[in-house]
Image: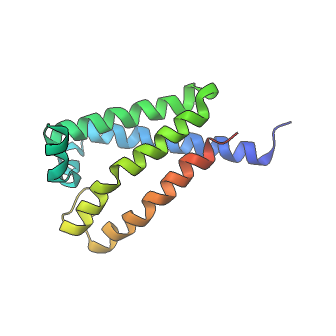
Amino acid sequence: MTSFREVARTAARVKLAALLGAAGVAHLTTLRRGFRITVPDWATKLLRTDKDTIVVVSGVVEILLAVALLVLPGERRRVGLAVAAFFVAVFPGNVHQWRTGRSAPGLDTDAKRLARLFLQPLLVVWAAWSTRR
C-alpha cells in the first residue's frame, strides 16, 4: 500500500520536474535574452565562454534533470542530489542579479530579487526531500 508520504513525494517530484522543464525551455526560447542578465561576468571568465552559452547550457541541463526526475526511478536519489547541486551552482547568478539590481524576467524589483535568494534554499530542500526513498 502506498503511503501518503510517498504520494506527496511523487507529486512534489513531478511538480519539480515541470518547473525545471518549463525553466529550461524558457532559457532556450522566450526568456533567453533576459536570463543573460543573471550571469555574472566572472562566470564567463571562469568557464571561458559567453553569457548566452551559459544560459543555453543551463537550460539544457534543466530539461535533462526534469526528464531524469520522471524517467529514472532507480536513480531517484542521485538525480535529486544533482538537481539540488544545480540549484546551488546557479545561486551566484541570483546573488549577482540582486547585487546589481538588474531586472530579469519576473524579477523586476529589488524585493522580488531579494525574495528569489530565499527561494533558492527551498528549491534545494524540495529536490532533496522529493527524491528520498
Q: Nearer the viewer, residue 77 or 109?
A: 77
Residue extending furthest toward the right: 1
Residue occupying image coordinates x 37% and y 43%? 23
Q: Nearer the viewer, residue 30 or 89?
A: 89
Q: Is residue 2 left or right of residue 57?
A: right
In the figure, 123 relative to 80: above or below?
Answer: below
* Viewer can see residue 106: no
Q: How is the image coloured?
A: rainbow
Which quadrant, please, contains the N terminus?
A: top right
Which quadrant, please, contains the C terminus?
A: top right
Residue extending furthest toward the front: 46
Q: Is residue 37 left or right of residue 77?
A: left
Residue occupying image coordinates x 31% and y 38%? 58
Q: Is residue 88 left or right of residue 50?
A: right
Pinpoint residue 110: horizontal percent, then vertical percent. Answer: 27, 73
Q: Nearer the viewer, residue 106 or 131?
A: 131
Residue occupying image coordinates x 40% and y 33%? 63
Pinpoint residue 75: horizontal percent, then vertical percent. Answer: 59, 28
Q: Is residue 116 left or right of residue 34?
A: right
Pinpoint residue 55: horizontal percent, then vertical percent. Answer: 24, 41
Residue occupying image coordinates x 49% and y 53%? 123
In the figure, 111 relative to 31: above or below?
Answer: below
* Viewer can see residue 28: yes
Q: Quadrant of residue 51?
A: top left
In the figure, 118 relative to 125: above or below?
Answer: below
In the figure, 39 relative to 29: above or below?
Answer: below
Pinpoint residue 21: horizontal percent, then vertical percent. Answer: 42, 37
Q: How many marks?
A: 0
Q: Nearer the viewer, residue 90 or 46?
A: 46
Q: Quadrant of residue 96?
A: bottom left
